[in-house]
Image (spheres, grey):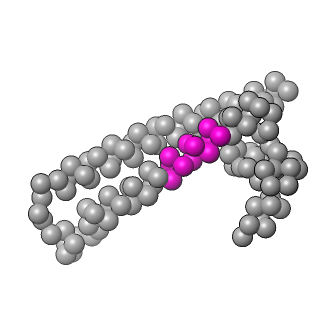
Amino acid sequence: MTDGAGTTRERLTAALAENAVQVDALEQQHARFVEASKDSNADDEHDPEGATIAFEREQVTALLDRARSSRAAIEEALARLDVGRYGVCERCGGPIAPARLEARPEATTCIACAAARR
């Protein structure tokens, strides 16, 4: 199982590293927006040039929340791999198709169970 698990672990570890870079960049961007609006009473809501600082800050906040959630999902996938539950549907107990895990390595359900949730 070294072959499959090693490749899976490497993919998940790489995804975690990529996610860390993304989270760091978003945190820096968010800090810049907060700093830009700090001590300012400028009315940017009526700026004809485009989005407000508040809007952009909220957009980055949403992206940051999503990236942090993704990090948690990847960490959980690594934990499942460690205990031998990776690739097992948490809903029905059946296998998760390799193609699904290739596309979404953090997937916790098989395609049938994921479709049933909708």
The residue at 73%/49% (across/down) is 108
Residue 32 % position (x, y): 26, 48
Q: How many labels does the image show?
A: 0
Farthest-out residue, right: 94
Q: Position of residue 50 (x, y in %)?
A: 27, 70
Residue 42 appears left or right of 9: left
Q: Nearer the viewer, residue 103 or 67?
A: 67
Give the camera-side residue of 69 and 9: 69
Q: Nearer the viewer, residue 78 or 46?
A: 78
In the image, residue 36 sits, relative to residue 55, either above or below, namely above
Specify whether residue 73 is painted magenta. Answer: yes
Residue 70 in view: yes
Q: Magenta residues?
A: 66-76
Q: Where is residue 46 in the image (x, y as percent from the top left)?
A: 19, 75
What residue is at 19 percent from the left and 56 percent from the top?
Answer: 37
- The secondary structure making up most of the magenta span is helix
Q: How far across and down, in percent of the image, does residue 25 sit? A: 39, 42
Q: Horizontally, is 31 left or right of 17 in the view?
A: left
Q: In which quarter of the image is residue 112?
A: bottom right
Q: Quadrant of the N terminus?
A: top right
Q: Which residue is drawn at 80% across and 43% down?
A: 87
Quadrant containing the C terminus in the rendered view: bottom right
Q: Does the magenta stretch include residue 97?
A: no
**Residue located 32% across and 61% down the image:** 56
Using residue 39 as the reference point, say whether residue 29 is left or right of it: right
